Image (cartoon, rainbow, N blue to C red):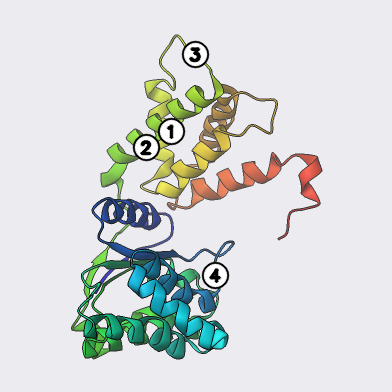
Amino acid sequence: MYRMTGPAGVGKTAIAQSCAEEFRSRCHLGASFFFTVHGCSDYSRFFTSISYQLSSKSPDYHEILDKKLRLDPTIVRKQLRSQFRELIVEPVRELELAGKSIGGRVILVDGLDECKDKEAQREIIEIVTTSVVTHTTPFYWVFFSRPEPQIEAAFADYSAASLCISTLLPISRGIDGEIELYLRCGLQNILRRRGITISHPWPSEPDMHTLVSAAQGLYIYAATVLRFVGRTDTQYDPQELLHIVLETSAQSSDGGSMRTPFEELDAFYTLILQRVPNGLLSSIQF
C-alpha cells in the first residue's frame, strides 16, 4: 500500500490523475475512484465502482460478477465489508482457482477525506488493510488524502503502518516553476480554444511573477485562475479577466502583515462570487 497526504490545494488530485493516466497507458490500472464533496462522496458506490472497473478489464471477471448480481441484486446495497467480499474477494479467488489471475494491478483512491462519512473512511482503510495482510486480493492500493484525524488513526494501526509507504506533500514554494508552466500552458490553451491571437507575450513576465507569487505553492490557486480566465459566460475576454485577477492580487498584498498561503485564495474566491451572473444567483446553494 502507498499513501500521499498533504493539505488542501497542494496538488494531490493532480498527481493522482497523472498517476492514473500513466498506469492506464501501461495497462497497470485496475481501477480508480475520486471522492469529491460536490461530486461523488457516497461511500456505498466505492467498492461497486471498483468491481465494475475490474470487470471491464477481464471478461472472466465480468462473467463472474454478472452471475453474482443476477443471483443476488441486493449485493450493491449491502454493508461495505459484504460488498468487498462478494464483489471483489470472491471473484478474484474464483479466477485464481481457474488459473486466470488479474493480480499486479493498481487501485488508486483519491480524496478519501471527502467521503461524506468519517466512519466509512476508517472502515475502507481497515477493509483494504486486512485484505493486504491476508492476501485475499492481489492488488496494489494507492491512497491520496488530507491528513484528517480518523484517516491518520486508521493508517497508524500497526497492521497498516507496517504495510504502507507514506509520503507527505507539503505547501512549498519549491514548485513555483511547475506552477508557472501549468499557468502558461493553461492560458495559451484558453486563447487557442477562443481563437484569439495576441502579438505580444501574454501574460507579461511581471504579471506571471505576480500570479506565481500569489499561488504560494498551491496548485488549487492556479487551477482556479485558469477556470476564471477561461469563462465564456461573461462579456469580458480572457485578457480582461486576467487583469481582474491581477488587480485583486495587488489589492490583497497591499497590507504589510504576514499572509497565509490561503489568503490569496480567499480573496480570489470572494472575487469569483462577486462576479457570478445575476441570473445564476438563485440557483447557488451555500
- The Cα atoms of the two marked residues, 1 and 2, are separated by 6 Å
User: How many residues crowd around disc 4 within 10 Å: few (fewer than 14), some, or many (20 or more)?
Assistant: some
Task: Name above or below for residue 253 compared with residue 32.
Answer: above
Q: In which quarter of the view is residue 164 placed?
A: bottom left
Query: Relative to the observer, which residue lies in front, 240 or 121?
Result: 121
* Other-residue count near label 3 (Cα within 10 Å), few / some / many at <14 / 14–19 / ≥20: few
| CA separation in Å, label 3 and label 4 | 41 Å
Q: Is residue 41 at all visible to an observer of this figure?
A: yes
Under tag 4, what secondary structure?
loop
Mark 4 against mark 2, which lies toward the viewer? 4
Residue of label 2: 182
Secondary structure found at label 1: helix
Instruction: Find numbered disc 3 in the image and state the secondary structure of the residue it sits on.
Output: loop
Under mark 3, the amino acid is Thr
Q: Is residue 194 left or right of residue 202?
A: right
Give the residue pinned by disc 4. Answer: 41
Q: Is residue 239 above or below residue 36?
A: above
Left or right of 189? Residue 267 is: right
Instruction: Tell me whether circle 1 and circle 2 mark residues in contact (CB < 8 Å).
Output: yes
Disc 2 is placed on an element classified as helix
Q: Is residue 113 left or right of residue 228?
A: left
Q: CA distance from mark 1 to mark 4?
A: 28 Å
Which residue type carries mark 4?
Answer: Ser
Type of amino acid under label 2:
Tyr
Residue occupied by mark 1: 186
Does residue 221 appear to the left or right of 240 in the view shown? left
